[in-house]
Structure formats: structure tokens, C-alpha cells
Image (cartoon, grey):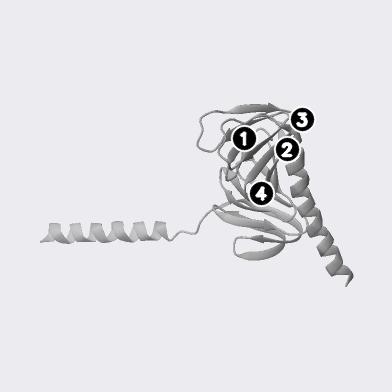
Amino acid sequence: MVWFRQGALTVVAVVWCASFLLAAPPRPIGIAVGELNFAAGTSTVRGQATLFDGDPVRSEFLPTRLHLKDGSRYVLGIASEGTVYRDHLLLRSGSADLMSAGRPSRVVSSLASVTADTAGSAATVYATKDTVTVLVRKGEMKVARLGSARVTTLGAGKAVTLKSDGRNGLALDSDTAVVEVARVQGDQLARLTEAAQDVNC
């Protein structure tokens, strides 16, 4: 009978400890910083917000800087939306800059994964509903279509556009890339113009 009580107490203690650990608050993975209002998690904030794994982030009229504890850095462009995870940024629409400061930074979109492994490397990823464009500004980037094991390394000044038509490979097409970049930047500029008109009214 004593053994049964000890066993029962042990089970109760284990269950209590497990429930306590499961109820522990999530740990922050970084911070978001913006000059004007931006959305982080379920709140609209100005200045700075703590980020947790899986938090959605949406910039409005100015870019939002994301600093993660693993050392990776991102800048979410004007009128852009993504979800931040402890090891990458999922870009849903708009643009995102990624840069490596000695630690890998990775942006994932609906079509591609873009990784900055080399310190000092920087690129901008532009995403629309059916197109993703990568423009490498410094160093080099590793680009892979989602679902493919093939990785293409792009150097500074190179650009690539992926479309949702399922074509294989990452053909370098600077003309298409320029058009897609201009399209996203045009949308962002329109958002800024709209904001300026609201302020003037």
C-alpha cells in the first residue's frame, strides 16, 4: 500500500511538473524596430516590439528592422508582410532585405529559400502573389526553389526571378527581374504617396 501511494505521488508530481513546463511563457527570439506604426504579433506598435517564434510582422509606411537573437538581421520593406521564426523570415508580400553579420540569415517565400552565409553579404527579396525576385547587393546568396535540392549561388549584382508556373531551374533573367523589382517598388511608392495625402488632409 505504501508503494502504491509513493507511485501515485510520483505520477502526480511528474504530471504537475510537465504541466508547469508546458505553461511556461514563450521565450523572445528578438526585437522589431520601426519609426512609425507597424504590426507585430497581435498588436500595432510604434518604436520597438518583442518578437516571439511565429509572430506575424507587417510594416506600413516605413521599413521595420528585425534583430534576432541568433545574430540574423532583416529589414521588412514598406507595406510588406512576413512571419518571423527563430531561424528565418517567411516573406508573404512586399520586400525584405537580409544581411549576414557573421551568422546566416534566411528568407523563405512561397517559391524560394534565400540564404546569406558569407559575412557582409546582402540582398533584397521581392515577393508578389506568383513571383519572387532576388537581387544580390553585396557578397553572395544561395538560392533554391522550394522542394528542390538544387542550390544556385548568386554573386553581387546578379538577380533572378522565380514564377509559380513550376518551370525548373533558376534562369538568370535580368530583364524580368528589373520589371518585377519595379512592380513591387511601385506598389510601395503608391503606399507612401497615399500616406502623404492622408497627412496633408
Image mark count:
4
C-alpha span from label 4 to label 1: 19 Å
C-alpha span from label 1 to label 2: 18 Å
Q: Are marks 2 and 4 in contact (CB under 8 Å)?
A: no
Q: Are marks 3 and 2 in contact (CB under 8 Å)?
A: no
Q: Which residue is mark 4?
A: 128
Residue 177: image tag: 2
- Give the mark nearest the N terminus, 3 or 2: 3
Element on which disc 1 rests: strand
C-alpha span from label 3 to label 2: 12 Å
Residue at the image position 65 percent from the left and 42 percent from the top? 132
C-alpha span from label 1 to label 3: 16 Å
Front in this rendered view, residue 9 or 177: 177
- Give the mark nearest the N terminus, 4 or 1: 1
Element on which disc 3 rests: loop
Q: Quadrant of residue 113?
A: top right
- Give the mark nearest the N terminus, 1 or 2: 1
Residue 72 is left or right of residue 34, and the answer is: left
Front in this rendered view, residue 33 or 116: 116
Q: Nearer the viewer, mark 4 or mark 1?
A: 4
Front in this rendered view, residue 164 or 146: 164
Q: Amino acid at mark 1?
A: Thr
C-alpha span from label 4 to label 3: 21 Å
Q: Nearer the viewer, mark 1 or mark 2?
A: 2
Residue at the image position 66 percent from the left and 49 percent from the top? 128
